[in-house]
Image (cartoon, rainbow, N blue to C red):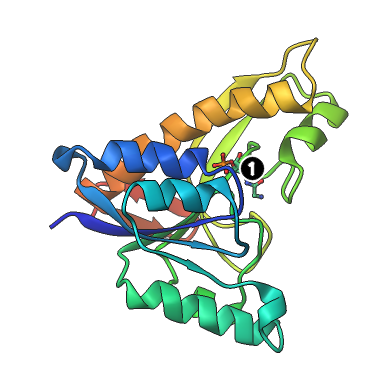
Amino acid sequence: MPARLVVLVSGAGTNLQALLDATADEAYGATVVAVGADRDGIEGLARAERAGVPTFVHRVKDHPDRAAWDLALADSVAEHEPDLVISAGFMKLVGPDFLARFEGRFLNTHPALSPSFPGMHGPADALAYGVKVTGCTLFVVDDGVDTGPIVAQAAVEVRDDDDVDTLHERIKVAERALLVDTVGRIAREGFTIEDRRVRIGHE
Ligand code: GAR
């Protein structure tokens, strides 16, 4: 049975698209069973719909408080019985209920080389700091901001003429490849987390 992926998005969804494209091949070992979002009208949801994948949306403002939103999001994800939940450009931090339910199987892709530049502005922060190499990080989500155990990373050169957009676009090329490759290997081979060390294929 292919591994069941629920993907969470907030925007363009190019990382989601890379997963959708990869899962078209049965040998990949995983399938996207649902896509969730925190807002309507985004290209990420349209990509899911075009692929015939069910979607759900929970906007924070439609719930009495953040905890209720978190619970509703977790319930919708759980309905699809995921083996892995993947935050791919999902611009919200989830709360304790969500983390407890999907502990150890909730991954996030971040556009910087952790532990540098956590948060919402990874490419801009790397550019402002003046680093010459940045990249992307796939990690297991914990209760910090981009602090969880690292599953995979890829380095990306910062060029003298980069602005935030050109740098982020180059990071995203590396990010999509890393996400597809790593999620596929996890789906086919499993993974273990021991303290902070993640190993694929050691189950
Ligand atoms: C990706 O670069 C992802 O790492 C980033 O948003 C982009 C989404 O692109 N996420 C964060 O910055 C979260 N802190 P996409 O919608 O085209 O996949």
Judge from the rendering whether residue 103 lies leftward or rightward of residue 122; answer left or right: left
139 vs 20, left or right, is right
Residue 131 vs 196, above or below: the answer is above
Q: Position of residue 163 (x, y in %)?
A: 80, 21
The answer to which image quadrant residue 85 occupies is bottom left
Q: Position of residue 178 (x, y in %)?
A: 44, 34
Question: Which residue, as the protein is rendered here, is positioned at the far top?
Answer: 160
In terms of depth relative to the viewer, which is nearer, 32 or 140? 32
Crowding near the residue tagged with mark 1, few <14, some 14–19, many ≥20 C-alpha atoms within 10 Å: many
Under mark 1, the amino acid is: Ser
Q: What residue is shown at x 45% (from left), y 51% (from top)?
A: 197
Residue 54 location in percent, x, y?
Answer: 36, 62
Q: Secondary structure at mark 1?
A: loop
* Nearest the eye: 11 or 163: 11
Give the tally of numbered discs.
1
Residue at 65%, 37% in the rendered image: 112
Residue 40 falls in image quadrant: bottom right
Question: In this view, which residue lies farthest toward the right?
Answer: 128
**Residue at left offset 77%, top offset 28%:** 164
**Whether residue 155 is situated above or below residue 64 in the rendered picture:** above
**Left or right: where 59 falls relative to 202:** right
Circle 1 sits on which residue? 114
Can the viewer see residue 150 in this picture? no
